[in-house]
Image (cartoon, helix red, strand yellow):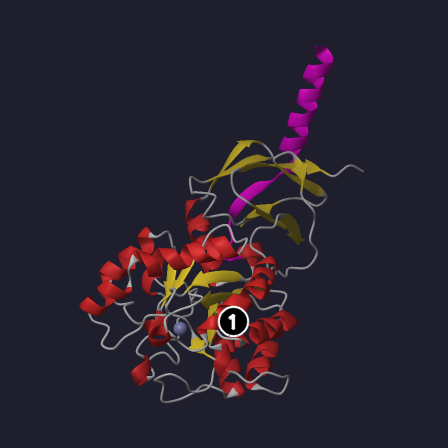
């Protein structure tokens, strides 16, 4: 009994001496300075080339495919049958930290995108069917992100509600293509309406109803630099069928400029929006000196990512999550959203963990 009491007393004293204090949640994972997210649209054979190119640089994307495998001829959009041959490459992409997003089954778009058209085009077969195709065909546990085919119907609130009701947490738009409104919406953070969510700029040749293209690598890179300086989110969009591949092409030169930065978080769009919800909902409270509970009431099936917490802590601490020691990471780079580790920067520890755990800080054994 005496030994046990002495042991508890020693543990309490060590913790009290540890001088650890919680100082906040970081805006992006692992306290990155900025986030980069990429989206690519449509079921074409070029999706595989585009993924191969991205993987050379470590950029992570949301891949929006239309999932109908055998649409009637009058409904065919681009070479939609390609989706059959794409699935193995798409499953590999999920393993590599990309995300599959839904883009309908038939890629229904129509002008004008009035209420009558949208009511018919956004039936359960499109909105829920495409989600279920992705769940059936890939190992991805949830489908977070929708993309409006041709950008149509995104402005209708009743359509946004259908998207939300199907479980999506964000829906990307493509605003006003006929007047080139889609070229550079210039959004540099999370959209205040996630069901009509814009992006920063396109990187692609002229296509569809567009009048212009955006290939000037200096201009493309300057926009990224501006967002990076402002510690924002650089969210860029491409159609793989409207790119040139190869190291000398505009797409790869732009990827080379924005990639491999140790202080940037490379993340698909859905998990980036999920991080915002996790950030807003997670509570951290000190249970006893050196012990902190980390919790939120979000559905873990949807909000399955990690959060980064910032602590002041003296040198030589170990960090345990749920009783298990966390590995220390020396470099800052983050390109996955579900990992756990800690990282020291001077007197600060950045602890990255899935929420709903207890963190303990202990002096390292000498
Ligand atoms: Zn499309």
Quadrant of the rendering where the N terminus is positioned = top right
Check residue 18 for magenta coloring. yes
Q: Which residue is outermost to the top?
A: 1
The residue lying at 68 percent from left, 59 percent from top is: 331
Give the crowd class for mark 1: few <14, some 14-19, many >=20 residues within 10 Å: many
Is the CB–ligand 1 distance for label 1 below 8 Å?
A: no
Q: Residue at x 45, y 62 (%)?
A: 101
Q: Which residues are magenta?
A: 1-28
Percent across and percent down for residue 31 are 56, 57
Residue to which mark 1 is pinned: 228
The answer to which of 302 and 242 lies nearer the viewer is 242
Relative to 343, say whether 45 is above or below: below
In the image, what residue occupies the spot 41% across and 85% down?
207
Instruction: Name the image quarter holding residue 55.
Output: bottom right
Left or right: residue 137 compared with residue 76: right
* Image quadrant in which the C terminus is located: top right
| Image height of 314 relative to 172, above or below | above
At 71% from the left and 20% from the top, the residue drawn is: 7
Asked if residue 320 is among those painted magenta in the image, a careful observer would answer no
Majority secondary structure of the magenta segment?
A: helix
**Place of residue 148 in the rendered image (x, y in percent of width and height, measured from the top left):** 35, 68
Camera-nearest residue between 299 and 95? 95
Q: Quadrant of residue 172?
A: bottom left
Percent position of residue 96, x then y:
61, 61
Decide if residue 360 is in sight here.
yes
Kind of element beneath mark 1: helix
Q: Position of residue 239 (x, y in %)?
A: 47, 77
């Amino acid at each position: 009994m005496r030994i046990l009491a002495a042991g508890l007393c020693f543990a309490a004293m060590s913790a009290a001496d540890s001088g650890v204090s919680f100082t906040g949640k970081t805006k992006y994972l692992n306290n990155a300075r900025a986030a980069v997210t990429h989206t690519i649209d449509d079921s074409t054979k070029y999706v595989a080339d585009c993924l191969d190119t991205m993987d050379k640089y470590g950029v992570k994307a949301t891949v929006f495919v239309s999932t109908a495998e055998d649409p009637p001829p009058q409904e065919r959009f681009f070479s939609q049958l390609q989706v059959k041959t794409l699935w193995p490459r798409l499953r590999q992409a999920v393993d590599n930290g990309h995300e599959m997003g839904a883009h309908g089954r038939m890629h229904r778009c129509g002008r004008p995108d009035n209420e009558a058209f949208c009511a018919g085009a956004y039936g359960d077969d499109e909105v829920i069917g495409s989600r279920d195709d992705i769940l059936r065909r890939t190992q991805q546990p949830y489908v977070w992100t929708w993309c409006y085919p041709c950008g149509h119907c995104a402005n209708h609130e009743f359509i946004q509600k259908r998207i939300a009701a199907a479980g999506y947490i964000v829906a990307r738009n493509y605003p006003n293509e006929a007047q080139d409104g889609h070229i550079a919406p210039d959004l540099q953070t999370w959209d205040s309406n996630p069901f009509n969510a814009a992006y920063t700029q396109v990187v692609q040749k002229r296509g569809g109803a567009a009048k212009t293209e955006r290939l000037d690598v200096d201009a493309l890179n300057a926009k990224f630099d501006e967002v990076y300086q402002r510690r924002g989110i650089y969210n860029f969009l491409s159609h793989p069928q409207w790119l040139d591949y190869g190291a000398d092409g505009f797409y790869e030169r732009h990827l080379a400029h924005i990639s491999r930065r140790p202080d940037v978080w490379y993340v698909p769009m859905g998990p980036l929006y999920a991080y915002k919800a996790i950030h807003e909902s997670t509570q951290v409270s000190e249970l006893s000196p050196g012990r902190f509970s980390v919790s939120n009431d979000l559905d873990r099936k949807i909000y399955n990512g990690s959060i980064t917490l910032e602590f002041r802590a003296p040198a030589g601490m170990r960090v345990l999550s749920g009783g298990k020691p966390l590995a220390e990471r020396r470099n800052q780079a983050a390109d996955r959203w579900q990992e756990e580790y800690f990282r020291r920067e001077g007197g600060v520890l950045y602890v990255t963990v899935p929420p709903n755990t207890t963190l303990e800080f202990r002096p390292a054994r000498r």
